[in-house]
Image (spheres, helix red, strand yellow):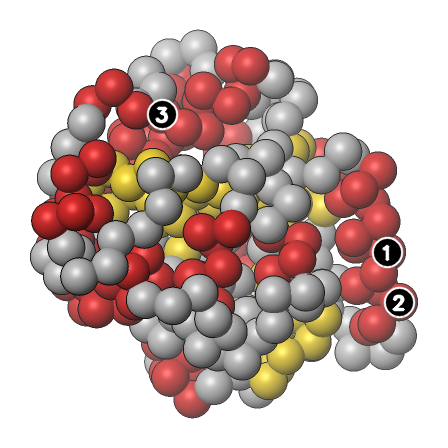
Amino acid sequence: MASFSAKVHLRVVESSAFGAASGALVADTLRQKPDAVLGLPTGNTPIPVYQDLLARQRQGLDLSRARVAMLDEYLGAGERRISFFRWLQEHFLEPAGIGPERVLRMPSAPLAIESACAAFEAQLAAWGGCDLQLLGLGLNGHIGFNEPGSPQDSHTRVVPLSQITRDANEDYWQGEEVPEFGVTTGIAVLLQARRLVLLVNGERKAEILRQTLEGPISSAVPASFLRLGREVWVIADRPAAVHLSPASMQPALDATVTPS
Ligand code: GLP
């Protein structure tokens, strides 16, 4: 059975330790660089990570200079309720005291969206790029809104959302209809992050995590491109790791790769 490159640091943890194990990596980045640029996702997976970071802040972690770049958004979100920006504000930015001047918001207005996407990337580059990019994993292998078929050289752009993604996203909005298009940071931009952290929990993600780490690197499973990143971490809880091969699991149990 295939296993992935040693460059990918896999940590498999108890579900109860998922937030803390992931938060430790973010805290480590911020200790090295207090004004680090953090690429942040929305969704159910990162909620325990944001809760862990807020707890660390109460215990002294300095977030006063951290900068945040959004990962993705719905086209047309604007000030509507169904908006990843609003979601991120509520779950992390506001409680952490990270104001708009330190947030690079993903554009969402349909008019002139292409130039707004280029401006987003230019501002990210002006900030020095992402120091750490957190990512959730879609059921179909998407990262951000890079749906299957997204090429390795893709940039920030509008994408049509698949039905499986729209259905999964309804969960965030109490069943309200999810927009047909998203705006996402492209794969090429994600791969420039100095540290990539893929967060995966729950058994329903086990098969797509196996394909992500042990299958071919291909646009059929966009998350597989992460294996080409500069420094790649995968934090998985035990249920998400059940289909990984013993060869993949071996380094995962090596505590020496864990930053405190
Ligand atoms: C969504 C979002 C992604 C998110 C992923 C996983 O569609 N566009 O940014 O990371 O799917 O979501 P969840 O963590 O809720 O499973």
Residue 221 appears in the rendering: yes
Q: Which residue: 28% across, 40% down? A: 10
Residue 247 horizontal side relative to residue 81, left or right: left
CA separation in Å, label 1 and label 2 = 6 Å
Residue 25: where, in percent of width, then height? Answer: 40, 28
Q: In the rendered view, would you say 149 is above or below 134? A: below
Q: Is mark 1 within 8 Å of ligand 1?
A: no
Question: Is residue 70 toward the left or the right of residue 209 in the image?
Answer: right
| Quarter containing the N terminus | bottom left
| Residue 162 position (above or below residue 217) | below
- Identify the element where label 2 is drawn: helix
Q: Which residue is mark 1?
A: 119
Q: Which residue position is annotated with label 2?
A: 115
The number of numbered discs placed on residues in the rendered structure image is 3
Residue that numbered label 3 is attached to: 24
Side (left or right) of 51 relative to 77 = left
How packed mark 2 is, by other alpha carbons closer than 10 Å (few <14, some 14-19, many 20 or more), is few
137 is higher (above) or lower (below) than 195? below
* Disc 3 secondary structure class: helix
Above or below, 23 relative to 84: above
Q: Nearer the viewer, residue 126 or 9?
A: 9
Q: Position of residue 117 (x, y in %)?
A: 79, 63
Q: Nearer the viewer, residue 178 or 221?
A: 221
Circle 1 Cα neighbour tier, 10 Å, few/some/many (<14 / 14–19 / ≥20): some
Ligand 1 has an atom within 8 Å of the beta carbon of the residue at disc 2: no
Tell me where residue 119 appears, x and y as whole percent.
Answer: 86, 56
- The amino acid type found where label 3 is placed reads Ala
Give the residue drawn at x 20%, y 23%: 255
